[in-house]
Image (tube, coloured by chain):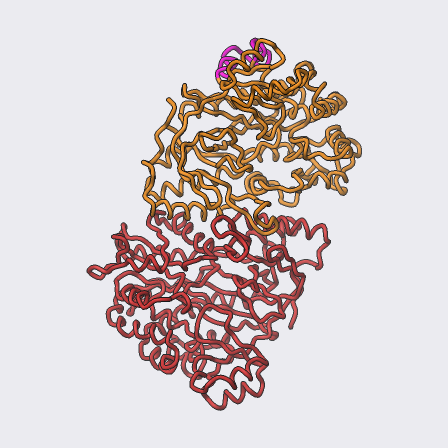
Chain colours: A red, B orange
């Protein structure tokens, strides 16, 4: 299976298409399916719609059900990884030697580890999958910091239901699974509740310039409208504002306001951290009793290196409850390889089209594919090979759809990636909440493109029509 | 009383203000409080927020209650006017001689009048008021075609509630009256139901380039989500699309689809009608059995001339049920004068600052104020004086507020105008629905400005905090 039939016969009649396009864009603008676009539009007073697939794309129902059910296992495993000092140390040791970013995070972790054992932390996670030609879902990566687009994806679903209704195809609406995407906000509310001071605030730490701000706003709104947190208890701060934090009796304060929960929507990329002072502040925050989302242990657990270590024979067993759980989780692992082993390096160089090289870091857009791998690896000094892992490339199934981006509509073969949201609230000893029913993000990209980032203009929001 | 206290002590602290501004703009973008801005932004893929007052502005509660209750009377009176051929003829006769626009509408009315007696029509109305220094609300005008901003005003209210919560001022939320602004869509749904063909559609006739499209979209959504009209039964067409309509057995068809309701969101300004063919089509539509919102009788009843005729001694009595109703309605009438009478012309020229000159037409932005009146009237040929009416200018009460427009925030004294929505569905013999509980639009403008149009950049959406 390399192609799936689209949900309606395509191409659409031109007049129908033109009307649907206008309907879809207007729906997006009426419902906040938007982001900032600084390069072209005035940042202060304009937005553009988030690029989207005009029609929902088909995805295998059995694989959707399977990865949804799997999220509880993924949550549990990453919780256990994040609390296993020795495993993290052994896995990341070599990377720390060469990669300053990981090393500095590690140093904070090492210095604050003991003090944080009894402090709750929250991780909002997203596990991403693609379906290969064999019809099976494979895990692409696990995001443990700043996992985005859960706030706006339910709006994308509503838009697709609306578009299906416009086409008078009500039956197709049934194939679209519900999306509890703002449910991760419940994790923030539960963390706030657990912190135990009803005057303390939830602090969203955002990038200096935020493009995807309306995704975060949907979570703020869910906190208020669904989960009972008063609006004035939700604050948004930039890194530069955090320079004013201080810790008294273990409690974290910003401008004399106590912070219960620090929700990091930045700090996932080194470019966001431009001063020694910020590193000092990050450590101060980490050392405090405030509930971090995520703390540094969770953050480090999201490294590609951890994903690769878990895929080694015998490793997953250490973090699972039983063989059945191991079997379930392993079934979604693609082949993952360290490049420092001569055998795997040879394998990758011999057949580069089978692989993708991924750096340790979150954030996307830095992968190396196929033919680019050989010259890249040859130019890379041997000690720096630790910075990358090799992964079997997934040849995704694809189907025809319309991709809508600004004033451009492209009728093309698209490939999809499904991300499942979940969260864990817990401390060193126990999990307080392991919540897997937190919705999804479904993305479409031109099947010919290797890149799929939405903000970068390659990815498009989509919804799965389960087949 | 010429000033009212703002709802919170002003000015706000600068840091608080900066945060509130960002919160308010993001709320607007997250909820579709937006419109198109073609001159600066790319029409196809961007929107800007609709200018707004950052805080709700105070308005007298007794006057708010009074004008809300009055809407049923206004609906009734304008229904009776629209069905009184002789009164319309007598009132508009002189205007028709000099004003081509009114004359052509009149001609269609005259030719189709008999055929339309048994055909239902819908009028979505908006009656606008300002409160003068005496603390009393006076009617500014009655709009009987394309009355806008009812769709987005409830979002403005939600935004103000959110801003009040951000300021931790929950008590102030109670002073903000609910807004059933999308309830006018119920009128469209009832008209569709009354038409009696479940396959026929509701056709929104929109301008060739629509700026305020998201206001209309809110009504479409209300039709589907609240009033049970299937999405595929709602279509949007431009005047140029209407050139394809035809009538068979009295039924109106566009591309073989039967139209139950024609909802005009254009045709209120002569500049929108650029061909003889469109006039022919307008007459064809008027002659059909489709339910027009509004039909031409309603359209003509919205002329300023009718407002002025109703204000003449003894006229209102002909359209009211009892003296109490006359008293209620007359209490909101400002002085309205015809300029063809030597006595009133003299009065206006002698003390121009007391008056505003208004042309017959809808759409706003064409009024002449104060000192500009004398040279204007002197240059106007005597026969053309019919085209204008003079109205007592209302010196509105004002209060301090922040007006937010694109990247500009102005801290200034603002004046407010309240519009009350209602609708009537009926034919020549009877009213089927007289619905007055259809919400409001509240606008703020710089108190020094004579113009208040939102699309023109002078007006700002606002909500009344009742005091």
Q: Is residue A63 above or below residue B34?
A: below
Q: Is residue A92 above or below residue A346?
A: above
Q: Nearer the viewer, residue A304 or A467?
A: A304
Q: Nearer the viewer, residue B135 or A261?
A: B135
- Pinpoint residue B310: horizontal percent, then vertical percent: 58, 15
Q: Quadrant of the C terminus of chain B?
A: top left
Question: Which residues make up the magenta segment?
Answer: B312-331
Question: In the drawing, does residue B166 fall left or right of residue B236?
Answer: left
- Pinpoint residue A48: horizontal percent, then vertical percent: 54, 53
Location of residue A137 (image quadrant): bottom right
Q: Quadrant of the N terminus of chain B?
A: top left
Question: In the drawing, does residue B202 fall left or right of residue B136?
Answer: right
- Residue sitting at x 54%, y 33%: B453
Q: Is residue A201 magenta?
A: no
Whether residue B177 is visible to the viewer of this picture, yes or no, is yes
Q: Is residue B444 above or below residue A336?
A: above
- Pinpoint residue A265: horizontal percent, then vertical percent: 40, 61
């Amino acid at each position: 299976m390399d192609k799936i039939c689209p949900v309606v016969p395509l191409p659409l009649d031109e007049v129908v298409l033109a009307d649907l396009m206008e309907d879809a864009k207007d729906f997006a603008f009426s419902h906040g399916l938007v982001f900032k676009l600084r390069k072209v539009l005035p940042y202060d007073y304009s937005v553009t719609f988030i690029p989207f697939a005009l029609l929902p794309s088909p995805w295998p129902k059995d694989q959707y059900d399977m990865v949804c059910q799997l999220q509880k296992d993924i949550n549990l495993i990453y919780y256990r990884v994040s609390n296993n000092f020795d495993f993290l140390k052994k896995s990341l040791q070599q990377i720390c030697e060469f990669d300053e970013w990981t090393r500095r995070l590690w140093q904070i972790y090492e210095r604050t580890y003991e003090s944080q054992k009894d402090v709750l932390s929250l991780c909002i996670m997203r596990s991403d999958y693609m379906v290969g030609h064999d019809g099976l879902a494979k895990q692409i990566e696990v995001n443990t910091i700043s996992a985005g687009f859960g706030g706006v994806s339910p709006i994308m679903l509503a838009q697709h239901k609306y578009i299906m209704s416009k086409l008078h195809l009500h039956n197709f609406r049934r194939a679209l699974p519900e999306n509890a995407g703002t449910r991760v906000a419940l994790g923030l509310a539960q963390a706030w509740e657990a912190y135990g001071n009803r005057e303390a605030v939830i602090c969203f730490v955002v990038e200096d310039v935020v493009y995807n701000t309306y995704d975060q706003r949907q979570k703020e709104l869910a906190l208020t409208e669904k989960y009972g947190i008063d609006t004035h208890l939700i604050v948004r701060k930039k890194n530069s504002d955090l320079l004013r934090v201080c810790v008294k009796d273990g409690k974290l304060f910003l401008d004399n306001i106590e912070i219960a929960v620090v929700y990091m929507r930045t700090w996932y990329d080194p470019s966001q951290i431009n001063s020694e002072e910020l590193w000092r502040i990050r450590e101060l925050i980490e050392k405090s009793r405030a509930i971090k989302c995520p703390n540094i242990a969770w953050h480090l657990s999201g490294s590609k290196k951890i994903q690769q270590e878990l895929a080694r024979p015998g490793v997953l067993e250490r973090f699972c409850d039983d063989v059945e759980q191991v079997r379930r989780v392993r079934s979604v692992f693609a082949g993952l390889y360290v490049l420092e082993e001569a055998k795997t390096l040879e394998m990758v160089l011999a057949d580069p089209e089978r692989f993708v090289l991924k750096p340790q870091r979150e954030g996307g857009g830095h992968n190396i594919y196929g033919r680019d791998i050989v010259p890249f690896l040859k130019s890379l000094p041997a000690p720096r090979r630790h910075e990358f892992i090799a992964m079997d490339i997934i040849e995704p199934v694809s189907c025809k759809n319309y991709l809508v981006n600004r004033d451009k509509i492209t009728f093309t073969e698209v490939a999809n990636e499904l991300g499942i949201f979940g969260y864990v609230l817990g401390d060193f000893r126990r999990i307080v909440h392991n919540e897997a029913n937190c919705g999804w993000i479904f993305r479409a990209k031109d099947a010919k493109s290797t890149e799929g980032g939405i903000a970068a203009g390659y990815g498009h929001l989509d919804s799965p029509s389960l087949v």
